[in-house]
């Protein structure tokens, strides 16, 4: 009951507000009341007109300067995102590669009415195939799950094969990441299954979310697919002519995830500069091409606290994508040892290191620096690669140091292991390496970079100092936020509890900022949200 009458009072007497709803004017009381985000909040003036306060619930007597409607975490982002993807919350668990974003994580997110992506990047095709079929069996009636398609410039055949698997298996959502150019694989994922509904609107069977960190890459995904790629796919029988014609009318992706300072592959761009830049580009291209539906922007990278999530939504993000912090979730496919290292990280405990998948190009990714020597050792390998034309050209002293301190094995032994790996995955790499000594050197050095990720996943204790753990500053911010709360314990860090607390906290912080714009006095605690168990 929201209104109580005074016992025994005449019926005509004015109602008296319950203390739960009565106006409050002290910063401490306002802060406590403001956390009731699911109730309307009225900004009121004291009888003498000298103080501002708030009341919740029914409209109180006296001067009311404004009313804020109820605020729910579900409402923080763009409503069209939730409608398009069949989710309750505008929240995505990102596709941490090598299966760190597990099928178990994807399933948990789907059942919690959020969206999650399996981390297919870096996995062999049979592993991706098993995961796709397992998810399809378990979540067949759900539409809110997906799998990652990562750009693989060194393995274009694998990239296309994975794309064919995803569309043929009916994966409802695909997250495309690390693309610098559009490829036949990503265009196939965008265009396969396009049709018109009875009203003539273009309908997608598969929804593509493209992760970008540069405006020029965003422009490619915000534009219709190039005719040359569409024609190529039609000629190969991968698309029908009708699908290609419809693909020329819509953007390659209707959800663009703007990735800022993230763990793993990143350009280290600040979100507050990058997202508005790409938003302006989005608006320009939508006007140019006359799209009938809005194209949404999401935010990723650097999101580890409610404040950061609230800021992303305030910048205009329709949804948020959380990655690094989910590596410490109970569902993550990372060893307990690696998770413990992440739980000890602060915001400065990260650095850049060579990436295994783009080693020859000099591309780097962001990794944990605390407790591991991976970045320094990987950097030594890349320096040696740049300075020499083959393994045989490396000076004896440097070779001995690399074999002893980094690889812990002779070059020849590592090459035999590498050769066996590529014999299973792509024998053409062996042929190329035997004809090109520098490529052979790259494959030997990439063995270390690839193995270091696996050591962190399996918890190989003897190689703890070589763990490659993708990590951004958000991990340290998250650790400071959860310190002393139930989420400090790794056993309590389920991916859903992390999500619900970040969203609830973002809503609380957003409400505090709304009230501050009215000049309502608040304490510093109004802009914080201690984690708690949420259902």
Image (spheres, helix red, strand yellow):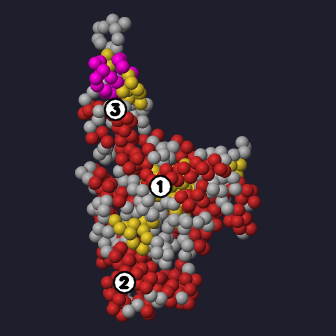
Depth order, front residue of 358/241:
358
Disc ID at residue 274: 1
For the record, the magenta segment spans 44-63
CA distance separating discs 2 and 1? 38 Å
Residue appearing at x 66%, y 59% in the figure: 225
> Which residue lies at the image location 65% right of the left edge and 50% below the top edge?
288
Predominant secondary structure, magenta span = loop
The residue sitting at 64% across, 62% down in the picture is 188
Asked if the magenta segment contains residue 46, the reply would be: yes
- The residue carrying mark 3 is 519
Residue 317 vertical placement versus 264 (above, below):
above
- Residue 86 seen anywhere in this rendered image of the structure: no
Element under label 3?
A: loop
Could you say whether the residue bearing mark 2 is in a helix, strand or loop? Answer: helix
Residue under circle 2? 407
How many residues crowd mark 3 within 10 Å: few (<14), some (14–19), many (20+)? few
Q: Quadrant of residue 194?
A: bottom right
Q: Judge whether residue 132 is colored magenta.
A: no
**Label 1 element class:** helix
Q: Is residue 451 left or right of residue 130?
A: left
- Which numbered circle lies on residue 204? none
Quarter of the picture holding the C terminus = top left
Of the 4 image quadrants, the one containing the N terminus is top left
Label 1 or label 3, whichever comes before in sequence order: 1
Residue 433 shows in this picture: yes
Residue 254 locus on image (x, y percent): 59, 52
- Front residue (pair 241, 460): 241
Task: Give how far across and how far down residue 83 sits, in percent.
Answer: 55, 44
Q: Residue at x 35, y 17 (%)?
A: 61
Q: Are marks 3 and 2 in contact (CB under 8 Å)?
A: no
Q: Nearer the viewer, mark 2 or mark 1?
A: 1
Q: Residues within 10 Å of mark 1 (few under 14, many from 20)?
A: some
């Amino acid at each position: 009951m929201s209104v109580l009458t005074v016992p025994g009072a005449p019926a005509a007497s004015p109602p008296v507000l319950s203390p739960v709803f009565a106006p409050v004017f002290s910063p401490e009381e306002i802060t406590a009341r403001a956390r009731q985000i699911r109730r309307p909040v009225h900004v009121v003036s004291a009888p003498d007109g000298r103080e501002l306060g708030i009341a919740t619930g029914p409209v109180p007597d006296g001067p009311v300067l404004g009313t804020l409607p109820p605020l729910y975490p579900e409402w923080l982002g763009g409503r069209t995102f939730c409608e398009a993807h069949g989710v309750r919350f505008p929240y995505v668990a990102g596709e941490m590669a090598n299966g760190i974003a597990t099928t178990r994580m994807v399933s948990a997110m789907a059942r919690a009415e959020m969206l999650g992506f399996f981390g297919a990047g870096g996995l062999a095709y049979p592993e991706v195939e098993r995961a796709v079929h397992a998810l399809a069996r378990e979540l067949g009636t759900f539409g809110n799950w997906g799998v990652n398609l990562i750009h693989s410039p060194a393995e274009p055949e694998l990239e296309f094969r994975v794309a064919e698997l995803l569309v043929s298996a009916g994966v409802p959502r695909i997250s495309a990441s690390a693309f610098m150019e559009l490829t036949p694989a990503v265009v196939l994922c965008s265009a396969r299954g396009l049709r018109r509904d009875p009203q003539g609107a273009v309908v997608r069977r598969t929804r593509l979310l493209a992760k970008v960190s540069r405006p020029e890459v965003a422009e490619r995904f915000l534009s219709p697919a190039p005719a040359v790629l569409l024609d190529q796919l039609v000629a190969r029988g991968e698309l029908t002519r009708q699908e290609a014609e419809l693909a020329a009318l819509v953007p390659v992706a209707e959800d663009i995830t703007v990735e800022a300072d993230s763990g793993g592959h990143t350009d280290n761009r600040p979100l507050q500069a990058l997202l508005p830049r790409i938003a302006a580009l989005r608006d320009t291209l939508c006007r140019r091409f006359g799209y009938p539906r809005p194209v949404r922007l999401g935010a990723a990278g650097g999101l580890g606290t409610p404040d950061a999530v609230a800021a992303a939504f305030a910048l205009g993000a329709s949804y948020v994508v959380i990655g690094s912090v989910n590596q410490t979730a109970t569902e993550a496919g990372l060893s307990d040892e690696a998770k413990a290292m992440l739980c000890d990280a602060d915001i400065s405990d990260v650095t850049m290191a060579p990436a295994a998948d783009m080693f020859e190009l000099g591309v780097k990714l962001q990794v944990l620096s605390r407790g591991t020597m991976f970045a320094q050792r990987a950097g030594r390998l890349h320096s040696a690669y740049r300075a020499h034309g083959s393994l045989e050209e490396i000076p004896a002293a440097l070779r001995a140091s690399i074999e002893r301190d980094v690889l812990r094995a002779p070059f020849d032994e590592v090459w035999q292991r590498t050769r066996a790996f590529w014999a299973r995955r792509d024998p053409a790499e062996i042929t190329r390496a035997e004809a090109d000594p520098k490529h052979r050197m790259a494959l030997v050095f990439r063995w270390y970079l690839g193995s270091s990720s696996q050591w962190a996943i399996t918890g190989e204790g003897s190689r703890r100092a070589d763990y490659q753990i993708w990590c951004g500053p958000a991990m340290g911010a998250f650790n400071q936020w959860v310190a002393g709360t139930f989420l400090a314990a790794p056993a309590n860090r389920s991916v859903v509890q992390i999500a619900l607390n970040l969203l609830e906290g973002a809503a609380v912080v957003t409400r505090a900022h709304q009230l501050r714009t009215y000049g309502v006095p608040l304490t510093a605690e109004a802009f914080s949200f201690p984690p708690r168990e949420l259902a």
